[in-house]
Image (spheres, rainbow, N blue to C red):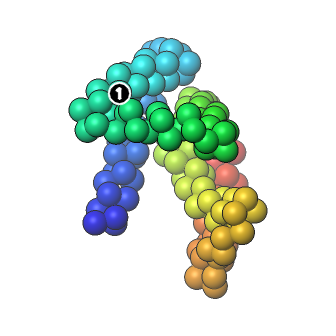
């Protein structure tokens, strides 16, 4: 089932980039992201209340200083990641921004190792990462 979710996310992110490229031509990135985040907050707050997870999740979050710091760090990185990809889309195009951003799985493996000593790199991921970085270099070189 995870593969269906992952592919669905990929399809929706692709559509989202194309839609927001058009939106960013009319309104600012910061206003657009603020509205999206507000709507997402309301929808997810309703969903967490409806499923009954809000109260226990808040209790868990409040009971762990480490978890609160992880949450704050994750939130800050998500905010900047959204801002940077939106700025990349507005400065070039959704297609090129997406082709370069696809290198993020390499950084997942790197940070998993650096932060948690998880070894997620093998010959296949190393070769794939090399191909991804080669692709990023080609995209940049031919679209300066």
Q: Position of residue 53 (x, y in %)?
A: 34, 39
- Above or below — where is 46 with respect to 61? above
Residue ranking furthest to the bottom: 123
Q: Which residue is mark 1?
A: 45
Q: Is residue 27 at all visible to an observer of this figure?
A: yes
List x then y, in percent, for residue 125: 60, 76
Q: Is residue 112 above or below residue 126?
A: above
State the residue in front, 22 or 63. Answer: 63
Q: Indicate the position of residue 36 as horizontal and vertical percent values.
A: 42, 24
Q: Residues within 10 Å of mark 1 (few under 14, many from 20)?
A: some
Taking depth in this image into account, of 136 and 126 the one nearest to the observer is 126
Q: Residue at x 37, y 33 (%)?
A: 54
Which residue is depicted at the point 47% across and 33% down?
A: 58
What is the quadrant of residue 76 in the picture? top right
Q: Which of the 4 image quarters holds residue 105?
A: bottom right
128 or 44, nearer to the observer: 44
């Amino acid at each position: 089932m995870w593969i269906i979710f992952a592919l669905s996310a990929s399809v929706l992110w692709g559509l989202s980039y194309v839609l927001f490229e058009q939106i960013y031509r009319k309104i600012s990135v910061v206003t657009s992201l603020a509205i999206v985040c507000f709507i997402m907050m309301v929808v997810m707050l309703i969903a967490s209340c409806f499923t009954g997870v809000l109260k226990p999740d808040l209790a868990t979050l409040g009971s762990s200083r480490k978890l609160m710091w992880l949450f704050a760090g994750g939130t800050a990185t998500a905010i900047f990641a959204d801002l940077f990809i939106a700025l990349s889309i507005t400065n070039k195009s959704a297609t090129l921004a997406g082709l370069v951003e696809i290198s993020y799985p390499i950084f997942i493996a790197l940070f998993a190792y650096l932060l948690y000593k998880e070894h997620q790199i093998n010959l296949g991921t190393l070769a794939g990462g090399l191909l991804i970085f080669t692709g990023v270099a080609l995209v940049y070189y031919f679209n300066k």
